Amino acid sequence: MRRTELDLCRITACFMVLFIHTSAELYHICPLDSEAFLSLSFISTMMRGSVPVFFMLTGALFLSREKLELRSFLIKHPLRLLGLFCFWSLAYALLSRLAAGSFGSLYDFAYSFVQGHYHLWFLTAMVLCCLFLPVAHAAIHAGKLPVGYLLFLFFGVSILFANFNLTPDTAPILYRITLNFSFDYLPYLGYAVWGYWLSGREFKKSWLLIAPAVFLAVTALTAWGNIWYSNYKQVADGWLFSYFSLPSLIQATMIFCFFQALKGREFRRPKLWAALADATLGIYLLHPMLINILQLAGLNMSLERPVLSVLGFTAALALICSLLALAGKKIPLARKLL
C-alpha cells in the first residue's frame, strides 16, 4: 500500500538537498560580518537533516517487510544504483570536458569517471548501505542469510577493498574506488534502522507542532554554533554540517516524525505525489547540470538579498528538474536512467 506521507517526506527532503547545493557557493563567499551571513547560515543549517532522511526512508520501506527476497533486492537496488553511478559519472565527466573545451588525457578522464561528480557520492553510499541491509533485516526478523552472501560481503567487499587500499601511489584509480565505497558510509545503515524503528511508532497530532518546534530550535542553536566557529576561524565553516552530527540527527528525526504524524490521513492528488516522489532520484541526478545551465543563462544569486535570491533560484531549479524528471519517466529508456 502506497504511503503518501512518506512520498511527501521524500519530496521535501529532495528539495532541501537542492537548497544545500544552491546556497553553498554564497555561504562560503559571504563576508562574516554581514547580515547576509546570518541568513545564509540559518538556511544552510536548516537543510542538513535532509540527506539522512533518505536512508531512514529506505529502512522504513525495506526493513519493515517480513521477507526480503535477496536476489531481487540486489538487482533492483544496489546493482541498479551502481549502474546509475556509472552512467551519470560518465555523462558529467564528458560534459565537464565539453564545457572546458579540452578533453585532457585518457587517464585523467578515467580517473574523473571513477571519482564521479560531487553529488554522486550518495549513490555509492546507498549501494554500500543496501548491500548490508539484508544483514540488518535478518537480524531484526530473526531470518537467515545464505552463508555465501556473508562470504561475499567479507571477501568481495571487505577484503577486496582493503587490498585496493594497499595499492601503490601509481594506482590511484583503484584507491579511488575504495573511497567511493568507503566503510565510512556504513553508519548510514544506522539511519536506515532508525527509520525502520520510528516507522513502527505511533505519532499523535501533537507531533505536527512538536516536530517543527524542535527542528527550528535545534536549527537556530546549530546556526549560532556555526556562526561562532566561522568567526573564530575567520572563514565560513560548516562546523556542524556533518550528516552524523547530533543536530543533523535531531533534524532528520523531526522531519521524519512530522510526516509520520500524518499517517492515516487522506491526501488530495496522491497519484501526483507518488509520481513526484518517484522522480526525486532523477531530480537529484539532474540538478547540478541544471544549476550550471541556469547560471550560464544569467540566472545568478546575489548577496544583496541572499534569502530571496536562493529561494528564487532554487524554486526555478526545482521546477525545471521536476518537469524534466517527470517527462523522462514517460520515456522507457530515460526511465531506467532516472
Image (cartoon, grey):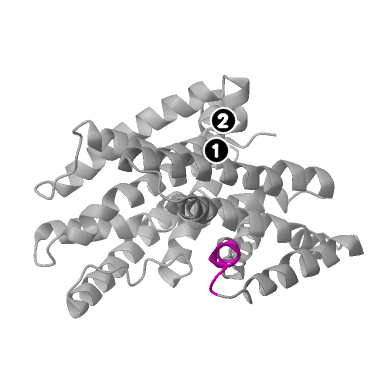
Question: 298 or 161: which is nearer to us?
Answer: 161
The magenta region covers 169-179
Place of residue 84 in the rendered image (x, y in percent of width and height, measured from the top left): 59, 42
Distance of mark 2 from mark 1, alpha carbons? 6 Å
Q: Is residue 221 left or right of residue 158?
A: left
Q: Secondary structure at mark 2?
A: helix
What residue sits 41% from the left and 68% below the top?
A: 247
Give the mark nearest the N terminus, 2 or 1. Answer: 1
**Contact, mark 2 vs mark 1 (Cβ under 8 Å):** yes
Residue 274's label in the rendered image is: 2
What residue sits 41% from the left and 38% below the top?
A: 95
Q: Is residue 336 left or right of residue 35?
A: right
Q: Is residue 257 visible?
A: no
For mark 1, what is the residue? Answer: 7
Residue 172 falls within the magenta-colored stretch: yes
Indicate the amino acid at tag 2: Ala
- In the displayed image of the protein, which residue is found farthest to the bottom? 232
Q: Predominant secondary structure in magenta?
A: helix
Q: Is residue 73 left or right of residue 207?
A: right
Q: Quadrant of residue 237?
A: bottom left
Indicate the amino acid at tag 1: Asp
